[in-house]
Image (cartoon, grey):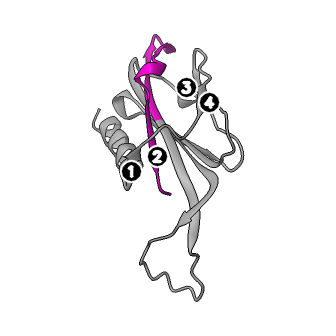
Amino acid sequence: MKFAVLGLAVCVAAGLSDTCWADDLKAAQKFTDTEIGFDPSGSYSNYTLTIAGPNGIHASVASKSSAPSIDLKRLGAVDDGIYHYQLTASTDEKVPLRSTLDDGRDSKPSTMLKGVSVTGHFEVKAGAIVKVDPNAREDVKRQK
């Protein structure tokens, strides 16, 4: 349980650094009995999907060009309970880079791609996703 809470805390902390609440990542949920996925309705890239659940279940998958999915069956034994997810991506919009970090490079970029994310939760019973509440979803905008 501690690892699930820790995994969720890491996801939330990463998603909330330099945040403001918005509805920026438009992606329809595509859940089956054991798979969590999304169908984005916009131009995004650099996706990362992370889930955290009971008893230390934590999984993350990334894709440069399309929204990834996670099949719970591939994680082995999946415990019943509430699972939390976060899908992050980059838009085509460039935003100013405000970091003062000296990375040792001669030429430093002055812009970066704008990052957006969406978070939510779902319930698993008897190894299958049984309840997904799209109204309980929280949308978060963050700079990546």
Q: Residue at x 37, y 35 (%)?
A: 56
Give me the C-alpha separation between circle 2 and circle 1. 6 Å
Give me the C-alpha separation between circle 2 and circle 4. 17 Å
- Could you say where residue 143 lies in the image, as x and y percent from the top left? 47, 56
Q: Are marks 4 and 1 in contact (CB under 8 Å)?
A: no
- Could you say where residue 144 lies in the image, as x and y percent from the top left? 50, 57
Label whose residue precedes the other's in the sequence (4 or 1): 1
In the rendered view, tell whether residue 53 sits above or below residue 67: above
Label whose residue precedes the other's in the sequence (2 or 1): 1
- The span picked out in magenta is 119-144
In the rendered view, tell whether residue 103 sits above or below residue 121: below
Tell whether position 141 is magenta. yes
Q: Are marks 2 and 3 in contact (CB under 8 Å)?
A: no
Q: Of tags 2 and 4, which is closer to the observer?
A: 2
Give me the C-alpha separation between circle 4 and circle 3. 15 Å
The N terminus, quarter of image: top left
Q: Label 1 sits on what residue type?
A: Thr
SS at mark 4?
Answer: strand
Q: Of tags 4 and 1, which is closer to the observer?
A: 1
Q: Residue at x 46, y 10 (%)?
A: 126
- Could you say where residue 21 lies in the image, as x and y percent from the top left? 39, 42
* Disc number for residue 141: 2
Q: Label 3 sits on what residue type?
A: Leu
Give me the C-alpha separation between circle 2 and circle 3. 27 Å
Label whose residue precedes the other's in the sequence (2 or 3): 3
Give me the C-alpha separation between circle 1 and circle 3. 30 Å
* Residue 73 occupies quadrant: top right
Q: Label 2 sits on what residue type?
A: Lys
* Crowding at mark 4 (Cα within 10 Å: few <14, some 14-19, many 20+): some
Q: Residue at x 55, y 63 (%)?
A: 95
Which residue, given by chain and number where applicable, does mark 1 sit on?
19
